C-alpha cells in the first residue's frame, strides 16, 4: 500500500535549499566584477549599498568595471542596520528599479542589501571587503530590533571576492571571522542536542560542512601556524552555504550566537559579532563537555579576543548575557536548555574558562 500511516509518520519535513549560483574567489580580480555580473544575470542597472569608508577604497575600481560592462549603478550609504534605516534605503532602491542589488562591505551593507533584495524580490550579489563573518554567502541577516537575532532573507545569487581587498582590511575583522568559524563547533553540537532531545530535523551533510569550516583553524592552531587568508574566506563561504543547505542557521548558530545576541541587547555596539561568538564558543564548549581549551587557543592563534577585558565588556555584562541568552530564542534547543543558568553558575563558567 502506497503512503501508509507509518510512512507519513516518518517523513522528514521538507525544507528549501537556496544556494548561490556563482562564487568567484580570486586575487586582484576586482576589474572583472562587471563581467561577473553580466554573466550571472542580465543587468543594465544595479543598486549598490556600501558604507562611506568602503566607497573610498573600492568605488572607483568598481565603477570602471561596471561601466566597462555597460551597467549603470546607483549608490546608497546605509546609516544603520535597524528597521527604520533599512526601510529608508529600501524606498530609494525601489525607485531605482534595479535589475539586481549589490552589497559591498564587511557586514552591515551586505546584510542590508540582502534584506532589501528579499523584500523587493530582486536578486542580490555579495561583494565582501572583509572576512569578518559567514553572512557573505548565507541567507541570514542580523538586524537591530526588539529581539536581536538572525532573520531569514535571500541567499546571494552570486558572491565575488577579491582576496587583495580582504588582505587590506583591519586584522581585527579577519580575527572576528575566525571567531565566527570556531562557533560552528558549538553550534553543530547544539543542533545534535536538538535532534536527540526534540527530534528536530538534523542535516548530516550541512553539519559536517560547517564543522569542516572550523577545522582548518583548529589544525593551524595545533601546528602554531597562521591559516591562509584565502582558506579563511573559503571556510566562511562554505559555512554560509552549509546554512543554505540546512534551510536554517542551525549548523552555524547555536548557544554561542545567543550569547552574542544577548550582549548586543545589553551592551549594543561593543565588540564585533565574530569576537562575541568566539568568546561564547569557549564557554558553551565547556558546558557541552567539549575541549574548550582548543577553541581558546585557536582564537588566540588568530588574534581574536578570549576575555571580557579584551572585548571591552564588564564582567557583570558577561554574566547577564549568559543568563538571558536562551530566552532570546526559546524555540531553539541548545545546551542552555539543559542548564538552569543562575548568576552563580554563569559566574563560575566565565571564571573557569578565563573569560573573566
Image (cartoon, grey):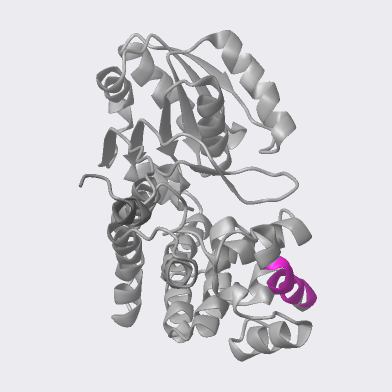
Q: Is residue 193 visible?
A: yes
Query: Which residue: 27% across, 33% down?
Result: 22
Q: Is residue 305 visible?
A: no
- Magenta residues, as a range? 316-325
How far across and down, in percent of the image, does residue 204 sit? 30, 62
The extreme front residue here reads: 1
In the depicted structure, whether residue 8 falls above or below residue 338: above
In the depicted structure, whether residue 11 falls above or below residue 342: above
Q: Is residue 65 left or right of residue 268?
A: left
> Quarter holding the C terminus?
bottom right
Asked whether 152 falls inside the magenta stretch, the response is no
How far across and down, in percent of the image, does residue 241 sit? 34, 47
Q: Is residue 262 left or right of residue 226?
A: right
How far across and down, in percent of the image, does residue 257 sit? 57, 62
Query: Which residue: 30% across, 59% down?
Result: 209
Asked whether 322 falls inside the magenta stretch, the response is yes
Q: Nearer the viewer, residue 203 or 240?
A: 203
Q: Nearer the viewer, residue 298 or 148?
A: 148
Amino acid at each position: 500500500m502506497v503512503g501508509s500511516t507509518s510512512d507519513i509518520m516518518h517523513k522528514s519535513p521538507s525544507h528549501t535549499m537556496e544556494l548561490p549560483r556563482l562564487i568567484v574567489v580570486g586575487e586582484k580580480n576586482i576589474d572583472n566584477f562587471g563581467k561577473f555580473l553580466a554573466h550571472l544575470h542580465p543587468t543594465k542597472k544595479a543598486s549598490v549599498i556600501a558604507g562611506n569608508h568602503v566607497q573610498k577604497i573600492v568605488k572607483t575600481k568598481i565603477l570602471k568595471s561596471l561601466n566597462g560592462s555597460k551597467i549603470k549603478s546607483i549608490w546608497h550609504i546605509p546609516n544603520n542596520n535597524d528597521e527604520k534605516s533599512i526601510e529608508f534605503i529600501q524606498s530609494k532602491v525601489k525607485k531605482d528599479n534595479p535589475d539586481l542589488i549589490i552589497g559591498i562591505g564587511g557586514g552591515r551593507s551586505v546584510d542590508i542589501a540582502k534584506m532589501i533584495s528579499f523584500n523587493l524580490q530582486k536578486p542580490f550579489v555579495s561583494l565582501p571587503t572583509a572576512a569578518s563573518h559567514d553572512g557573505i554567502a548565507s541567507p541570514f541577516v542580523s538586524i537591530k530590533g526588539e529581539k536581536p537575532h538572525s532573520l531569514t532573507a535571500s541567499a546571494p545569487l552570486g558572491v565575488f571576492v577579491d582576496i587583495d581587498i580582504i588582505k587590506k582590511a583591519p586584522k581585527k575583522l579577519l580575527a572576528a571571522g575566525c571567531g565566527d568559524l570556531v562557533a560552528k563547533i558549538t553550534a553543530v553540537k547544539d543542533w545534535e542536542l536538538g535532534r536527540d532531545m526534540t527530534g528536530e530535523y538534523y542535516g548530516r551533510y550541512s553539519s559536517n560542512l560547517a564543522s569542516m569550516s572550523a577545522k582548518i583553524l583548529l589544525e593551524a592552531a595545533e601546528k602554531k601556524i597562521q591559516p591562509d587568508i584565502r582558506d579563511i574566506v573559503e571556510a566562511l563561504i562554505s559555512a554560509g552555504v552549509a546554512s543554505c543547505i540546512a534551510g536554517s542557521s542551525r549548523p552555524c548558530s547555536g548557544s554561542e550566537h545567543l550569547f552574542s545576541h544577548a550582549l548586543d541587547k545589553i551592551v549594543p555596539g561593543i565588540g564585533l559579532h565574530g569576537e562575541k561568538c568566539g568568546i561564547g564558543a569557549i564557554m558553551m564548549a565547556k558546558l557541552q563537555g567539549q575541549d574548550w581549551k582548543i577553541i581558546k587557543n585557536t582564537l588566540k592563534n588568530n588574534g581574536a579576543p578570549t576575555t571580557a577585558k579584551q572585548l571591552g565588556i564588564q564582567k557583570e555584562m558577561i554574566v547577564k548575557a549568559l543568563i538571558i541568552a536562551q530566552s532570546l530564542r526559546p524555540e531553539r534547543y541548545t545546551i542552555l536548555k539543559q542548564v538552569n543558568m543562575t548568576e552563580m553558575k554563569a559566574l563560575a563558567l566565565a571564571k573557569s574558562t578565563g573569560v573573566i
